[in-house]
């Protein structure tokens, strides 16, 4: 559901104000460092209760302040329904999230309510970064459509922490590790099966969209390589864990499981990311976000909010136009631009445009 307004108080460098954003598309025009990305971050906070930058809450408070608050009005899905009021505040070490005046105790409630898909420079790590960055992206994609996946991932990480703590103990107890191994195998196999289904959903969509923008001529496909064989049962995995126990005790960590799964991009039978140009990799990360939004709508039947942070700069004009043509439908889309860009080309009749300067917004 789209945002109608955003209220800001001591957040980053943004002025304390309320901004009307009741439009299908909202353009933010301004030089670097004026507050465009901070505005998108505020919307992301209202969607998930956290920042897409990976920063801690204290860093989001305006310099010299020990608190911030954000408020948003979210339009209802039908004219006869009331709008939602979402508020996120942070003071000292305490963060509070309220939806229509009631406290939100688990951020899953926000994911199910008003998800946003952000396109930003940091996404480049999904294409060329470490394996954990790719695992993060695909886990996030699965969590957008399934609260059960979020719970399963949390449970696996909890058991993994217990196992690593037991392995690091001075005298690990065999019977304790045997019990934990069975739990790890159960949660881990379930997680891998969910990821296998996700790969099938993503792969065909991704290949089609990437080729549609790049015109590369060779398909780029998504491959998922689970660390365990998903065909095995729980007892077989537990047996294999027991066989490596001495090695893991010596190192004090778990050497196998979904936390070591691999995602890759393959073209003509080879690792595409290993030979792709910087431009091809940037387009790869943008395409992943396109498919994430598409996948969400196909699975849930609702449209997400899109937050696009200067990403059109990374494409030449021809690719930019093809990208916009293939951009998934959205409840609302926010774009940031530098003043010299030809942003007028992308306006429609339902576009609201703000000039951003020193954290302030002029229509």
Image (cartoon, rainbow, N blue to C red):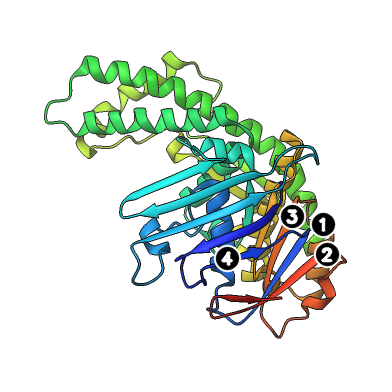
Q: Is residue 56 visible?
A: no
For the residues bearing labels 1 and 2, Cβ distance under 8 angstroms: yes
Residue found at x 86% / y 67%:
348
Give the CA separation, mark 1 to mark 2.
6 Å
Specify whether 244 is left or right of 102: left
Which of marks 4 and 1 precedes in the sequence? 4
The residue wearing badge 4 is: 39
Q: In x, y percent, where is residue 153? A: 47, 32
Which of marks 3 and 1 precedes in the sequence? 1
The residue wearing badge 3 is: 332
Is residue 188 placed above or below 9 in the rendered structure? Answer: above
Q: Secondary structure at mark 2?
A: helix
Give the CA separation, mark 1 to mark 3.
15 Å
Q: Secondary structure at mark 1?
A: helix
Which of marks 3 and 4 precedes in the sequence? 4
Q: In x, y percent, where is residue 343? A: 77, 76
The residue wearing badge 2 is: 322
Is residue 66 placed above or below 165 in the rendered structure? Answer: below
How would you rate the neighbour count of disc 2 (Cα within 10 Å): few for under 14, some for 14-19, many for 20 or more? some
For the residues bearing labels 4 and 3, Cβ distance under 8 angstroms: no
The residue wearing badge 1 is: 326
Give the CA separation, mark 4 to mark 3.
15 Å
Q: Nearer the viewer, mark 3 or mark 2?
A: 3
Q: Nearer the viewer, mark 1 or mark 3?
A: 3
How would you rate the neighbour count of disc 3 (Cα within 10 Å): few for under 14, some for 14-19, many for 20 or more? many
Q: Secondary structure at mark 4?
A: helix
Q: Is residue 263 visible?
A: yes
Q: Which sits in the foreground, 51 or 74?
A: 74
Q: Which sits in the foreground, 125 or 84?
A: 84
Q: Which sits in the foreground, 326 or 41?
A: 41
Q: In x, y percent, where is residue 116? A: 63, 50
């Amino acid at each position: 559901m789209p945002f109608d307004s955003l209220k800001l108080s001591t957040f980053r460098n943004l002025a304390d104000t309320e901004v009307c954003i009741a439009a299908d598309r909202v353009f933010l025009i301004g030089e670097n460092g004026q507050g465009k990305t901070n505005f998108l971050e505020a919307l992301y906070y209202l969607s998930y209760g956290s920042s897409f930058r990976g920063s801690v809450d204290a860093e989001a408070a305006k310099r010299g302040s020990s608190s911030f608050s954000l408020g948003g009005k979210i339009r209802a899905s039908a004219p006869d329904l009331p709008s939602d009021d979402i508020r996120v505040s942070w003071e000292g070490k305490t963060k509070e999230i309220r939806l229509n005046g009631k406290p939100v105790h688990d951020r899953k409630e926000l994911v199910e309510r008003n998800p946003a898909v952000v396109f930003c420079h940091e996404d480049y790590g999904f294409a060329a970064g470490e394996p954990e960055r790719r695992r993060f992206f695909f886990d996030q994609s699965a969590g957008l459509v399934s609260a059960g996946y979020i719970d399963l991932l949390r449970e696996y990480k909890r058991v993994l922490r217990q196992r690593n703590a037991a392995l690091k103990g001075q005298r690990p107890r065999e019977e304790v590790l045997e019990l934990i191994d069975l739990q790890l195998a159960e949660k881990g196999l379930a997680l891998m099966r969910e990821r296998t289904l996700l790969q099938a959903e993503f792969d065909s969509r991704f290949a089609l969209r990437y080729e549609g923008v790049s015109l590369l001529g060779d398909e780029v496909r998504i491959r998922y390589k689970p660390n365990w064989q998903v065909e095995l049962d729980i007892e077989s995995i537990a047996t294999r864990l027991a066989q490596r126990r001495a090695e893991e005790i010596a190192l004090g960590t778990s050497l196998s499981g979904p936390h070591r799964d691999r995602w890759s991009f393959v073209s003509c039978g080879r690792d595409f990311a290993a030979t792709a140009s910087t431009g091809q990799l940037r387009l790869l990360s943008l395409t992943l976000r396109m498919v994430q939004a598409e996948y969400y709508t196909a699975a849930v039947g609702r449209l997400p909010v899109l937050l696009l942070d200067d990403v059109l700069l990374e494409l030449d004009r021809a690719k930019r136009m093809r990208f916009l043509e293939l951009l998934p439908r959205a409840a609302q889309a926010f774009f940031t631009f530098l003043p010299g860009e030809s942003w007028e080309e992308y306006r429609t009749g339902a576009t609201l445009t703000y000039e951003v300067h020193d954290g302030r917004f002029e229509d």
